[in-house]
Image: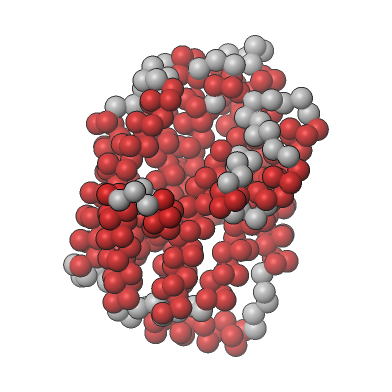
Amino acid sequence: MAELDLLRFLAALAVVAFHYLVAFASVWGARPAALFPALAPFAGLGILGVELFFVISGFVILMTVWGRGLGAFARSRLVRLYPAYWLSLGAVAALYGLTGATALDPKLSPGQYLVNATMFQRLFKVADASGVYWSLWAELRFYLLIAILVIAGVTYGRVLVFSGVWLAAALAARSVENDLLKEIVMPDYAPYFVAGMALYLIHQNRKALLPWLYVAAGYAMAVPAALDRVHRRIDAAGFKNMPVTDTSVIVTLTLIFAAMALVALGLIRLKPSRTLTALGATTYPLYLFHGVIAAALIPLLTGDLPPWAVALVTTLAAVVLSYLIYSFAERPIQRLLKPRRSPQTTTSSAVQIQKASVP
């Protein structure tokens, strides 16, 4: 779906804008919001790019698991997530181990880098090697929960039951002091994943009404969760350095849900093209690598160029390098790891998915 490729890339670009123009004070040696006062109120909203990622993930992962077994789902996620992640982890370790770079340095031991290689470092109370890795922990927990649905068998009714139970558990987790429950059901992020799954059901059957209740419930729960996340950032940095208002957060979140609803209804359709495919392919490496690229480039360019030129050059370098990483490193590794399938197996699987997708 070309429109999802574009939305994913825009989400990644929003996160890049947030980090480069608002968050990365240690990289610039100054508060970025002071360097980009006109852009900071908009770039600050880029923090919600991750929320868009989560909605898209709910949509795409449900589409991925429909008609597939647990083994196929696990293999597809491993091949999709880990190659670029390992490459980015290696880049972080090399930057701080082989150069004099200090900005964003996680200050990890070799053993802690090895724990990061599992992507389960937060389970072992080890710091993330890169600040963006926190969202991957949320994705992994989503995959573990969705595995329960895969084992039960993915059907229209079971997806609704699963989503309803998850939302109820997330709502309950907000009102009780139980860290384990919160870690499992993710009350701050569950609304996005569930809304994305419900939107995929709507994409399958546009006459379905019940999934819209899940979208509405997800939106209602997402608003306070997004405001809380932004407020935590404001409390830590100060409003001057994170100049984002509650109104702008609610408007942005509404646009995220509206855009995904239009995609689900087929009202946004883009013709597939090499450009959109390339943008979609670049998204994950861009998300993983833009921090290490900023830490390497911005301190070198600052002083020789005005801030806007430094930000522009670094962003372009991040996009180009991320595409090269995908083309010449990530994709070849994925091809090596991806199991070969015979034409007969592929045809059989396609028939199974087609049958299973009927509500």
What residue is shown at x 43% (from left), y 25% (from top)?
Answer: 236
Outermost residue on the top side: it is: 303
What residue is shown at x 70% (from left), y 20% (from top)?
Answer: 300
Residue 293, percent across and down? 65, 33
Residue 129, percent across and down? 64, 41
Tell me: 90 left or right of 290: right
What residue is shown at x 34% (from left), y 31% (from top)?
Answer: 231
Image vertical order of residue 125 relative to residue 266, above or below: above
Q: In which quarter of the image is residue 214?
A: bottom left
Outermost residue on the front side: it is: 177
Number of numbered discs on residues:
0
Image vertical order of residue 100 relative to residue 126, above or below: above
Residue 319 can be seen, yes or no: no
Report the front residue among 88 and 126. Answer: 126
Image vertical order of residue 232 relative to residue 268, above or below: above
What residue is shown at x 24% (from left), y 65% (from top)?
Answer: 211
Image colouring: secondary structure
Tell me: 300 left or right of 71: right
Residue 1, percent across and down? 44, 60
Q: Quadrant of residue 216?
A: bottom left
Residue 91, percent across and down? 72, 41
Report the front residue among 126 and 151. Answer: 126
Residue 342 can be seen, yes or no: yes
Image vertical order of residue 320 relative to residue 358, above or below: above
Report the front residue among 226 and 170. Answer: 170
Specify the quadrant that holds the C terminus: bottom left
